[in-house]
Amino acid sequence: AEDKKDWFVADRFGMFIHWGLYALGARHEWLKNREEIAPEDYEKYFEHFDPDLYDAREWARRAKQAGMKYAVLTSKHHEGFCLWDSQVTEYKATNTPIGRDLLAEYVEAFRAEGLKIGFYYSLIDWHHPDFTIDVHHPQRNHPGVEQLNSGRDMTRYAAYMRDQVRELLTNYGKIDIIWFDFSYPKREYRGLPGKGHKDWESDKLLALVRELQPGIMVNNRLDLLEEEGYLPDMTTPEQYTPRVAPTIKGQEVTWEACHTFSGSWGYHRDEDTWKDPDQLIKLLVDSVSLGGNLLMNVGPTGRGTFDERANQALEAYGEWMRLHG
Ligand code: JFZ
């Protein structure tokens, strides 16, 4: 029988794209956290976000020539900034100088090249006023952190996420993957709240996804518990490739490793850790030979282009794929 995973397992190779305001900082997508940047200082990236060279069709062509068959773009990363014209926030690309729904352009262009469409959506949000300040939040060391946290209400934030996911899975046609993301301590830590599936209301979020897009692939980062019988559509080892096929309760599972060209996911201009073509091709072969997928990340620049080093890496994949793919 045909399974909704068939295309995913057959396609094997996708492009991850981490793009947001952090591209302007050009030094890691976690810069707001790492440097504990105050909201008013981070605001400059919003005010100057103007990716004048963004051409989604060129991204799609480059992905396709590399042999990639699907893509996953950050609709919203931890910073909270939305690439689409969300009706439930002002913190979105349409309110920046570029003034366009950048996600819509991505969907159209990648679909036109015949690639499947995925959205990454962060459960973490360092901008939303109801998202409680925890140990990874940029304001964790604010002297008035307790006061800042009083009145914040994660149930309102969870409802906001459902509103956004409803937009994402209603307004852009058939979506093939939704890639949720969180990586937080679950329990209270240093007096700051922990976070887990109860805070995200992951069960409701998943039910909504299933209702809106019955055929979609959902990854495993909702903190839903495999011990309690939850089986994700795929598991997602990150920045490492398993040496044996991963299992849950003894069963082999559908899986996708994700890797970066250098180290960070967002554009990082000065990183010296770019992998060479041999390393990149090995990552693909290692995943595929163990029955897994590879989601290879590109972090476009603040002007909306792929860095020359990313283009070279993608071309190396393309050359190899044309001979061996
Ligand atoms: C997360 C993000 O924080 C990061 O910025 C990027 O988007 C990446 C793809 O995902 O980072 C994680 C998520 C999960 C784990 C580690 C880092 N994990 O499960 O070990």
Image: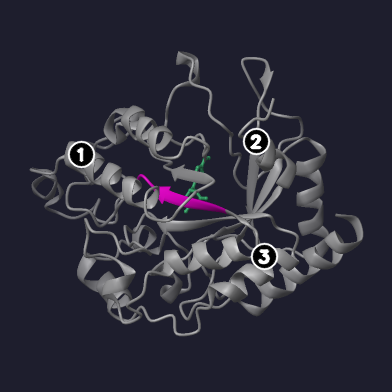
- Tell which of 231 and 278 is nearer to you: 231
Quadrant position of the C terminus in the picture:
bottom right
| Badge 3 or badge 1: first in the primary sequence | 3
Location of residue 272 in the rendering, given as x and y in whole percent from the top left corner = 65, 70
**The residue under label 3 is which amino acid type?**
Ala
Depth check: 7 or 159 in front? 7
User: Which of these two is toward me, 15 or 152?
Assistant: 15
Numbered badge on residue 288: none
- Residue at 23 percent of width and 59 percent of height: 87
Residue that label 3 marks: 63
Residue 161 sits above or below residue 324 on the image? above
Counting other residues with Cα less than 10 Å from the Cα at mark 2, is it few (<14), some (14-19), or many (20 or more)?
Answer: many
> What is the number of the mark on residue 154?
1
Q: Which residues are magenta?
A: 117-124
Helix, strand or loop at label 3? It is: helix
Per the model, the C-alpha gap separating discs 2 and 3 is 21 Å
Mark 1: C-beta under 8 Å from nearest atom of ligand 1? no
Mark 2 is on which residue type? Trp
Q: Is mark 3 within 8 Å of ligand 1?
A: no
| Screen quadrant of the N terminus | top right
Q: Is residue 168 visible?
A: yes
Q: First in sequence: mark 1 or mark 2?
A: 1
> Image point 65% across, 36% down: which residue?
255
Pointer 3 and pointer 1: residues touching (CB < 8 Å)? Answer: no
Q: Is residue 301 left or right of residue 277?
A: left
* Residue position marked by numbered label 2 in the rendering: 255
Task: Answer left or right for 173 relative to 299.
Answer: left
